[in-house]
Amino acid sequence: MITSLAHRPRLILAALAVCLVGGAAEAAEPVKADATAAVAIMYHRFGETGIPSTNIRVEQLERHLQLLKEGGFTVAPLPEIVDALRAGKTIPPKTVAITVDDAYASAMTVGWPRIKAAGYPLTIFVATEPVDHHTRGYLSWDQIRQLVAEGVTIGAHSESHAHMAKQTSEQAAAEIERSNARFKAELGFVPKLFAYPYGEANAETIKAASHAYDAAFGQHSGVITAEDNRYFLPRFALNEHYGDDERFRLLINALPIPVEDVTPAEPTLKSNPPAFGFTIADPGVSVANLKCFSSADGQTKTELLGRRVEVRMEKPYAATRGRINCTAPGPNGHWRWFGRLFYLPEGVRLPGVKDD
């Protein structure tokens, strides 16, 4: 039962800040008394300042926890959010889940003590091979067992932290099976939740995850809803560069853009840039001031045709992953959000681009 507890480019954030000046007041939607959506935030490392792209500074984390407390947010266990949305139950407004990927040791030594002191639950997604190999900087199985004893939810994050979007369905299923066998041997249970390494997925890996878990998460920005594909759910990523107060407030207060008929349907691209589009599923949701931003070329050309949104990017993605985020002003100064992370296989990458 859920109970109440007291990498987006800077260009996109700057453009969104400009929109904030005049857009939010135009929204006429009421804020519902209950909710069918939640925000999940994602960290990797804590206090490891030499690796800013996957680290959050201690003072940033402490400030995030303070903002959650002061804002009256319900910080709930991720499995309870998933179960409630699966069952069609409402959850408290302003519900947030805290997640951590990769099982770096600083999640236990730096992050968890502060999150626990705030009275908040935590989910850590563990890739088993680095733990098995006693890789420096990662948690041990003994530490993971201690975290479980203290109430931390453990999720699966594959065996080897591979680029699973490159794998066949057989390879992905085998990776998951080996990982789950290690969880069963070391912890006595198999996790119910999964997070794709790097946030990368394709139809085959999503299918493999659906056979093994209750839900699976990417690293694309957005708000979790009951209507989402349960095996490709969004989370907002945080690090040193994108962990300031302004961005954090924006994310934890985000509302969903209800969508359907998303194209391309699969997050692994067959053309670069993609012809991206979606239909607004709820005609009562206003997206009159919707804007979309690509990690390749900033604000895109966006056309609203009734409830259909067509987005045309001029520049191809120049990396192995590409992002697009669409936002629109919502009620009471909140912002609606829908994002996608795409994986670019070798055939659609720019020459010379390799997996990172």
Image: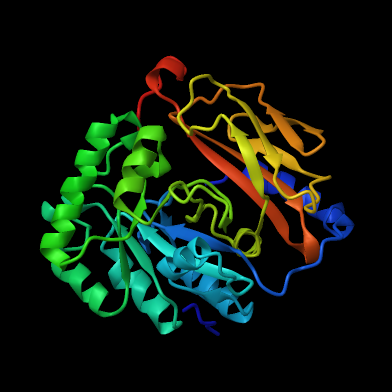
- Depicted 261 relative to depicted 133: above or below: above
Q: Does residue 9 show up?
A: no
Q: Is residue 200 above or below residue 94?
A: above
Q: Where is residue 128 drawn, in percent x and y?
A: 19, 53
Please name the residue shown 19% across and 50% down the image: 179
Q: Residue at x 72, y 56 (%)?
A: 335
Residue lying furthest front:
87
Asked if residue 299 is positioned above or below residue 63 in the image, the reply reads: above
- Residue 170 rendering spot, x and y as whole percentages: 23, 33
Q: Is residue 232 above or below residue 3?
A: above
Coloring basis for residues: rainbow
- Residue 47 is situated, as x and y percent measured from the top left of the image, at 37, 64
Taking the image as shown, residue 281 lies to the left or right of residue 218, namely right
Classify residue 80 by image quadrant.
bottom left
Where residue 338 sits: x, y (%)? 63, 47
Residue at 54% across, 72% down: 63
Q: Visible in this render: residue 255? A: yes
Residues 262 and 271: in front is 262
Horizontal side of 233 relative to 92 (left or right) equals left
Give the side of residue 163 with respect to residue 351, left or right: left
Quarter of the image for residue 58 reads bottom left
Q: Quadrant of the C terminus?
A: top left
Q: Nearer the viewer, residue 217 or 162?
A: 217
Q: How many marks?
A: 0
**Measuring 48% from the left and 67% from the top, which residue is drawn there?**
81
In this rendered view, identify the residue nearer to me: 186 or 112: 186
